[in-house]
Amino acid sequence: MSQERRDTRPKLLQAMIDAFGQADLRKKILITLGLLVIFRFVAHVPVPGADLEAMREFLAGGTSAGSLVGMLDLFSGGAMRNMSIAALGVYPYITALILMQLLVPIIPRLQAIAREGDAGRARINQFTHWLTVPLAVLQGYAQMILLQSQGIFPPGSIGLSGDALLPTVTMILAMTVGTMFLVWLGELITEYGIGNGVSLIIFAGIVSTLPVMIQQGYLAQGAGDLWGLAIFVALALAILVTIVIFTEAHRRIPVQYAKSLYRGGKMLRQSGGTHIPIRVNSAGMIPVIFAMAMLIFPGVVASYFAAAPGSDPNFANTIQNLFSSTSWFYWAMYFFMVMGFTFFYAMIVFQQQNLGETLQRQGAFVPGIRPGKITQHYLNRVITRITWGGALFLALVAISPFLVQNITGVAVLTLPAIGMLIVVGVALDTMRQLEAQLMMRRYEGFLK
């Protein structure tokens, strides 16, 4: 192939051709795709005893309980909608990861293990796997109780006594095994494929649900409001571009390293420069997940005490309505809670890194700033200012479904804000890893 012919092709297409032209990269890509196909097959293996039509009506109802299950359905790639053995997805594992991240700086024993290098990280990862199992059991049982209250399972069919015991235990074990199987697939992708495996499983699940969601929205909206659908698509693309910009945005903090060299029996001092990239959105999607979980919880609890339809509403009905996804109060609280959790999580992450002390140990310094605590205070101020931008960005993305529906009037489609954050983040991370593999072989990557 001539160089002129190569130059006329789009760089993305040429990079894909180059990747498949390398035997080891081609093997990694095919392994990744094959394991993701296995995940999609598992997502359609159903748990016996569930009413799938009732489940779909429940998810479309817009209740607080439906919003919670809908978020889990998003993470599982539609497996919850199908009541699959993979209905829990990798969400228990993600919860365990977040809990371990919060516990490590609090528990001295875990701090000591985390400082042991690769061996310490392996032990923390093992603890995370152990924690995933009870979380999956508890989440599976709680979901089945919730779904039984909504008519998805027959009354009395879910419980830990009598005739309901064996079916309940069987379904819980099946969903727990499904979760651990998906985590295992994700780790196989990480080790033998391209990208972060668990993230790619979530990515594949979200992407696989998009065509169905668009088709349902188009059929429900019909040709009566094509302008509304066009504006909806335009706003969705604008939000997607904004997510890409803020995901990649960062501030570079200049750092100087003092070097000592011996030449001719004399010590010469030289300095080298680099930078610390501090991302505007350093918290990722975690604040959005935290805020949604906190907001959904009151409505779910109130649903157990709310008066039946047709009777006089009580206080639980009021709470349920306030924390419904159709309430402006819900979205206002969502906005401010995402901002709060963004600051909270970003501060925890940067406190764990302890950049000021690390730079001082390495003989590095920020120009014009004294090493040690003064540097740490300076970095904390920079991080706080940058996090304001990241917090506002995440909060606006979080409430974008509410804003887009009110602007376009398209109520049958819901813009998956969390899904868009995940898809963009995972896609960029996977492209960077593949680009790094190509650059090692002197090819241009996707991001050039």
Image (cartoon, rainbow, N blue to C red):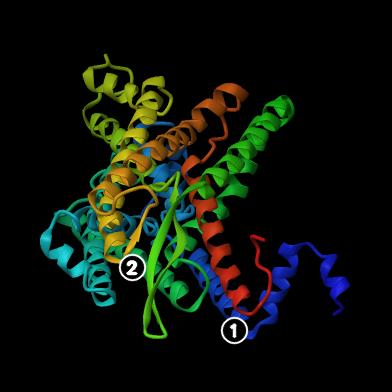
SS category of the residue bearing label 2: helix
Residue of label 1: 24
Where in the figure is residue 176, as x and y percent of width and height? 30, 63
Q: How many C-alpha atoms fall within 10 Å of the one at disc 1: few (<14), some, or many (≥20)?
A: few
Amino acid at dot 2: Met
Amino acid at dot 1: Asp
Instruction: Give the answer, above or below, for where 388 lies relative to 119.
Output: above
Residue of label 2: 180
Please report the residue visible at 54 percent of the width from the left and 77 percent of the height from the top.
31
* Viewer-nearest residue: 377 or 386: 377
Please report the residue visible at 72 percent of the width from the left and 26 percent of the height from the top.
227
SS category of the residue bearing label 1: helix
Please report the residue visible at 65 percent of the width from the left and 67 percent of the height from the top.
445
Where in the figure is residue 268, as x and y percent of width and height? 40, 74
Q: Nearer the viewer, mark 1 or mark 2?
A: 1
Q: Is residue 42 left or right of residue 23?
A: left
Would residue 43 be seen by someone viewing this image from the given angle? no
Instruction: Give the answer, above or below, for where 145 lies relative to 83.
Output: above
* Viewer-nearest residue: 247 or 181: 247
